[in-house]
Structure formats: structure tokens, C-alpha cells
Amino acid sequence: MERQPCVYLLASKPNGTLYAGVTSHLVKRVWEHKNHAVEGFTRRYRVSTLVWYEVHETMDAAIRREKAIKNWRRAWKIRGIEKMNPEWRDLYYELL
């Protein structure tokens, strides 16, 4: 996947800890989470499985969507994940 604004959700395990993020380079950013290259929430809680993502035309649109998703109830996030990825597969490897 080339550079493209994306919103994404990571999980520690199925129905585990969730993390919402935004990036212009999804493969690179998820690699950073998987390899604990950046300190913070995902390193501390071992959240590195890409379970959902959404591509946007502009970074502004992606940032607005990320802010909205961060305000969603947990059940809504899980429904979104299970609609796209019912087995909670790590979608990172499908992007390579």
C-alpha cells in the first residue's frame, strides 16, 4: 500500500484492548507498532494487530474520522471490526 491517508484500529487480541490511529502510510505505521518503535499506549499494552482500516482521500478527512471513532462506544468499534474482519485476522500481512 502506497502513501494514502487511513484510519485504523489495532487490537491486543480478539475483543481485547483497542487503539484508534490515523496515518498517511499504513504499512509503515503498523510496522512501527508491531516492533515497538515508538513509546506510548500500544507499546505499553502490546496492541499491534491491525484488525480494521479505512482509506480516505485526504488527511483532513482521515483525521476527522479518527476523532469520531475515538468517541464511539466500544461496542460500535467491535461491530465495525467484525463487519470487515469477523475472524479478527491481522490485516497487516494482507497489505504487504
Image (cartoon, rainbow, N blue to C red):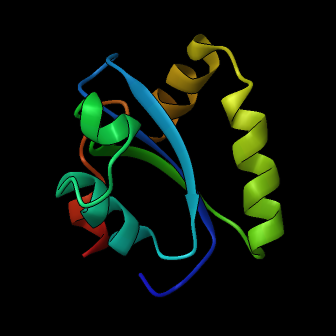
Q: Position of residue 37 (x, y in %)?
A: 24, 61
Residue 59 lies left or right of residue 14; in this view the side is right
Residue that appears at 32% across and 48% down: 39
Residue that appears at 57% across and 15% down: 74
In front: 58, or 29? 29
Q: Position of residue 82 (x, y in %)?
A: 45, 28
**Rendered image quadrant of residue 22:** bottom right
**Rendered image quadrant of residue 48:** top left
Residue that appears at 50% across and 21% down: 78
Look at the image and tell me in which quarter the C terminus lies: bottom left
Please, is residue 6 above or below residue 39 in the view?
below
In front: 27, or 93? 27
In front: 21, or 43? 43
Residue at the limit of the structure toward the bottom, as seen here: 2
Q: Position of residue 41 (x, y in %)?
A: 39, 35
Q: Position of residue 68 (x, y in %)?
A: 78, 37
Look at the image and tell me in which quarter the N terminus lies: bottom left
